[in-house]
Amino acid sequence: MEYRPLGRSGIEVSAICLGTMTWGEQNSRDEGFAQMDFAIDHGITFWDTAEMYAAPPREETYGRTEEIIGEWLASRGRRDRIVLASKVAGPSPRMSYIRGGQARLDRANIEAALEASLKRLGTDYLDLYQLHWPERSTNFFGKLGYQHEEEEDVTPIEETLAVLDDLVAAGKVRTVGLSNETAWGVMRFLSLAEQGKGPRVVSVQNPYSLLNRSFEAGLAEVAMREHCGLLAYAPIAAGALTGKYMNGERPDGARMTLFPNNKRYFTPNGVAATEAYVALAKRHGFDPAVMAGAFVYRQPFLTASIVGATSLAQLETQLQAAETHLSEEILEEIEQIHQQFTYPCP
């Protein structure tokens, strides 16, 4: 297993990050335990969760994933071997059950969210605490174009950073990161930290895959120059890049079969691009999921790729992807497809 620096924090993380959002919804407690056992046995020491998980989010499963991780930690006693990350939710009209529908990135909300997460996880601290999405309106969760909104009532970033600074000073959080952020947002957080107004963010968790390379447009340079690397979620586009949904197929138990409303990776160009990438992988003798995963792991701006598996077989596939070398010929063909289908899925 390869290990990489988490920003300038001095913390090293495995290049594969164990995604956990299916535990408590698509996966049972015992299946989550099996994945954690497998991960630790194979050197995967970086785990990512969030207060709003399991996903898709609903009130009945809110916080359940963190509870499952906490139960595993209590059972196995391996907290010191894991770099554990979680996230605080921002405002969302679809999740009115989070703090009475008043979730914001202010002091009261962040402190309450962290205390609840620590209790569910059964730990005194988090290695990485992330803002799950910005409080301001911007282009995240399936949007590429930015539409400005004047006079928004949002918590100033300075206030958010001040809270995080206090949590770091108290030893409850080792380091902090962002998620679903833009280049402006990351640079604003970094600039304020340089002014002494809070901790320096070490990572940004955004989507990145063959079907969504928008991170490269502006954030890649930020990640490289500022040592604020990408934690890539949906590296195989929620399973689309395995090819299992092609020709309208919906396998039993698959995510898009169970939760068909998520159309993010099924735009007309997304479907066409998927078909092209799957054909390319098979022409070169690769499992499409291995080729798609290997492409993500080779990016110089990547800190870790978050693998949200629902089975041990899927975790094994991504272990193979992390060790797979893609030839220049394959990379050139990938670029040809990318030029034809640029940003097919936001």
Image (cartoon, rainbow, N blue to C red):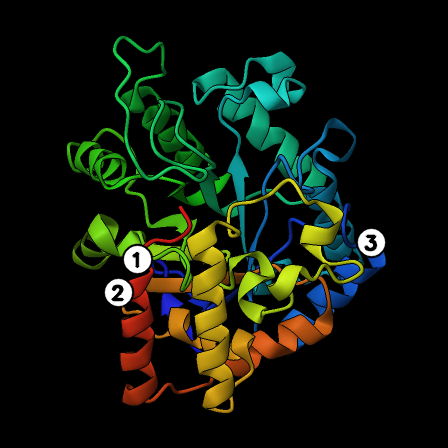
Is 42 located above or below residue 4 in the figure?
below
Q: Quadrant of residue 80?
A: bottom right
* Secondary structure beneath label 2: helix
Closer-to-camera residue (153/94): 94
- The residue labelled by disc 3 is 28
Q: Residues within 10 Å of mark 2 (few under 14, many from 20)?
A: few
Q: Mark 2: which amino acid?
A: Gln
Is 79 located above or below residue 45 in the figure?
above
* Residue 56: image location, x then y, percent: 67, 40
- Label 1 or label 3, whichever comes before in sequence order: 3
Q: Mark 3: which amino acid?
A: Ser
Is 91 located above or below residue 150 in the figure?
below
Between the C-alphas of marks 1 and 3, the distance is 37 Å
* Secondary structure beneath label 1: loop
Q: Residue at 44%, 81% (x, y): give it.
A: 280
Q: Is residue 29 left or right of residue 6?
A: right
Q: Is residue 190 visible?
A: yes
- The residue labelled by disc 1 is 342
- Label 3 or label 2, whichever comes before in sequence order: 3
Q: Residues within 10 Å of mark 3 (few under 14, many from 20)?
A: some
Q: Quadrant of residue 63?
A: top right
- The residue labelled by disc 2 is 339
Find out whether the residues at labels 1 and 2 contact each other: C-beta distance under 8 Å. Answer: yes
Q: Residue at 82%, 53% (x, y): give it.
A: 29
Is 131 located above or below residue 156 in the figure?
below
